[in-house]
Image (cartoon, rainbow, N blue to C red):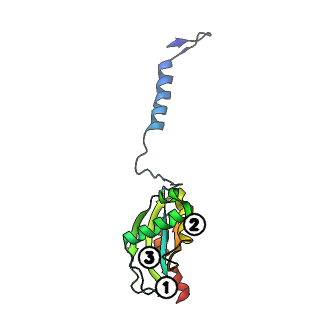
Amino acid sequence: MSEDGDGNIADVSEVNSTQNSKRKQDHLPARGHQISTLIIKTPPFSYAHLSLLTASTSPQKPTLDEITVRSYLTSALTQFLGLSGAAISIDILKVESAAGKKLDEGGEVWVRVPREDLAPFLAAVGGWVGEGGNVGWRVKGSGNWLSELVGGRHEERIWND
């Protein structure tokens, strides 16, 4: 208890306990499920969907495997950006063979690169011509989310059929 200057007596302990209980209730977790959201603004990786183009005059199509893809991509990056291009980290996610493809298509590749390296990567592989002008890359799609590329994979068939 305390007395103010006018002689009034107040119970300070009751006032303090009421304020403390209100503060404690504000910090208590709500009952039930708590809904929260998370927004990823800048993903660390980007993805590219590439198709290997071969010249129709070439005697045979190159077989497309992971080692061939790696050598073609490294060649393209080195030719366009030098040693700094060769240092770009590339993860080969999937390689599809050329079975059932058009004559000039040699297979498809999905790769993952660091997000900040996507633009130089696409410029390098999009302009690369190798093996005496017989092979090159066609960029079929790119983006920050792999699901967009996989989902849009067959969109061109809608307009061609």
For mark 2, does the 10 Å Cα neighbourhood hold few (<14), some (14 to 19), or many (20 or more) residues?
some
Q: Secondary structure at mark 3?
A: strand
x 42%, y 42%: residue: 29
In 3D space, how far apart are the residues under numbered discs 3 and 2 (Cα atoms)? 18 Å
The amino acid at mark 1 is: Asp
Rendering coords of residue 140 (x, y %): 52, 75
As shown in the figure, which amino acid type bears the numbered disc 3? Glu
**Vertical relation: 116 (above or below) 25:** below
Q: Please report whichever mark, 3 or 2, sits nearer to the chain's N-terminal start.
A: 3
Q: Which mark is residue 108?
A: 3
Q: Residue 123: which disc?
A: 2
Q: CA distance from mark 1 to mark 3?
A: 12 Å
Q: What amino acid is found at the position of numbered circle 2 in the picture?
A: Ala
Q: CA distance from mark 2 to mark 1?
A: 21 Å
Callout 1 secondary element: loop
Above or below, 74 relative to 7: below
The answer to whether the residues at label 3 and label 2 have Cβ atoms under 8 Å apart is: no
Q: Residue at x 46, y 31 (%)?
A: 21
Q: Horizontal placement of 81 versus 36: left or right? A: right
- Front-lying residue, 64 or 141: 64
35 w.r.t. 26: above or below: below
The residue nearer to you, when weighing 58 against 35, is 58
Residue 130: where, in percent of width, then height? 50, 74
Residue farthest right in this picture? 6
Q: Residues within 10 Å of mark 1 (few under 14, many from 20)?
A: some
Q: Can you identify the residue that label 1 sits on?
A: 104
Please indicate, yes or no, whether residue 71 appears anywhere in the rendered image. yes
Query: Residue 87: x percent and y percent?
Result: 47, 56
